[in-house]
């Protein structure tokens, strides 16, 4: 067979395989829709393409980005007049309080569809949602990921990890395209942050985190201080409400590991809570 004919044959074969897979997917979607009638984890409507995941495409497309201008410190939306009145785009809280987080970003606001998707991912064990959420985090947070050396997931306490079965921050971090380093450990169980004020949240997580090798009391094959020193890292979590948990983690990384820069990337950011 001549080279040109061989290439044509391979292209045709590839097209045939693509068509077969597409036909199989359509057939499977139809059967699942009839037999199981799965509903979207966000809106509750019948899924037309259940093989594509537990959330329908219209729900994914309805997630809107946070509208600029955004605070360069925490990522919270700012009034438009700050663009011309304040050279450094910082919200009142970030200008008032020193932070160990250099920059922060999120997909969107923690409400509506995004809140429902994160709830299904985190509390209903829909771990397949991590890939799509992380893809949106990569897109919205591309500048934060650029030049970073590590993605560091916010840790769960071992008891919470056993209860939930997984750490949602780890699942997200693994899909961001950066090497993942589980450099932090939660050294004491903390009460839920839900319903707490910003000050209460900061007290709740105060000294709750440590470098993992220090907390475990043995060498992990690498000294976290040596590996992380003078590097740029991205802290990863599902939601930032007041930023207290991220700040507590960043403080450990800056003070105990001497990292050069800590950036924070989350799936959602709460913007309606009093700051």
Image (cartoon, grey):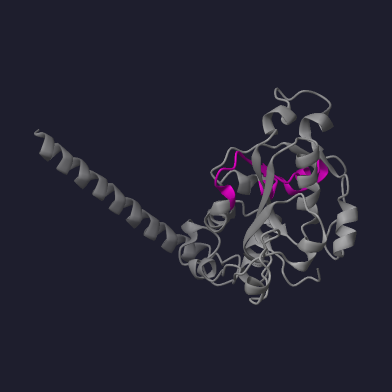
Visible residue check, residue 167: yes
Q: Nearer the viewer, residue 261 or 173?
A: 261
Q: Confirm whether residue 128 shows in the render.
A: no
Quarter of the picture holding the C terminus:
bottom right
Residue drawn at the location 48% of the way across and 65% of the way down: 33
User: Residue 70 location in percent, x, y?
Assistant: 64, 66
Using the image, determine if residue 264 lies above or below residue 108: above
Q: Position of residue 272 (x, y in %)?
A: 74, 72
Does residue 183 belong to the magenta stretch?
Answer: no
> Where in the figure is residue 130, as x and y percent of width and height?
59, 52
Question: Which image quarter: residue 166?
Answer: top right
Instruction: Using residue 63 as the reference point, say whether residue 211 is left or right of it.
Output: right
x and y percent of residue 110 in the render? 68, 66
- Residue 27 or residue 122, whichever sits in front: 122
Closer to us: 90 or 60: 90
| Residue depicted at x 59% and y 51% | 144
Q: Which residues are magenta?
A: 144-169
* Depth check, front residue: 124 or 217: 217
Residue at 65%, 37% in the rendered image? 231
At a point 65% along the width and 42% down the height, the residue shown is 233
Q: How many marks?
A: 0
Q: Residue furthest left?
A: 2
- Specify the quadrant that holds the N terminus: top left
Residue 79's image quarter? Answer: bottom right
Q: Please say whether residue 161 is one of the residues in the magenta stretch.
A: yes
Question: From the viewer's perspective, is 225 left or right of 129?
Answer: right
């Amino acid at each position: 067979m001549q080279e040109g004919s061989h290439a044509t044959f391979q292209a045709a074969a590839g097209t045939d395989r693509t068509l077969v897979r597409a036909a199989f997917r359509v057939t499977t979607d139809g059967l699942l829709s009839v037999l199981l009638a799965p509903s979207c984890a966000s809106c509750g409507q019948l899924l037309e393409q259940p093989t594509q995941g537990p959330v329908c495409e219209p729900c994914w497309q309805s997630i809107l980005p946070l509208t600029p201008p955004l605070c360069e410190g925490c990522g919270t939306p700012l009034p438009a007049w700050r663009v011309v009145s304040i050279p450094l785009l910082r919200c009142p809280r970030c200008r008032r309080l020193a932070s160990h987080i250099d920059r922060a970003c999120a997909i969107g606001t923690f409400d509506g569809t995004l809140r429902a998707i994160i709830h299904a991912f985190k509390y209903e064990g829909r771990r397949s949602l991590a890939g799509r959420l992380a893809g949106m985090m990569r897109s919205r947070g591309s500048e934060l990921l650029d030049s970073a050396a590590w993605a560091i997931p916010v840790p769960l306490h071992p008891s919470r990890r056993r209860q939930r079965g997984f750490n949602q921050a780890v699942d997200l971090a693994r899909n961001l395209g950066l090497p993942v380093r589980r450099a932090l450990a939660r050294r004491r169980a903390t009460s839920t942050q839900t319903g707490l004020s910003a000050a209460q949240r900061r007290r709740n997580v105060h000294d709750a985190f440590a470098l993992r090798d220090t907390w475990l009391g043995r060498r992990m094959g690498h000294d976290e201080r040596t590996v992380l020193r003078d590097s740029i890292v991205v802290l990863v979590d599902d939601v930032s409400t007041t930023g207290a948990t991220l700040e507590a983690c960043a403080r450990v990384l800056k003070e105990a590991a001497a990292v050069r820069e800590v950036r924070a990337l989350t799936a959602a950011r709460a913007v309606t809570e009093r700051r």
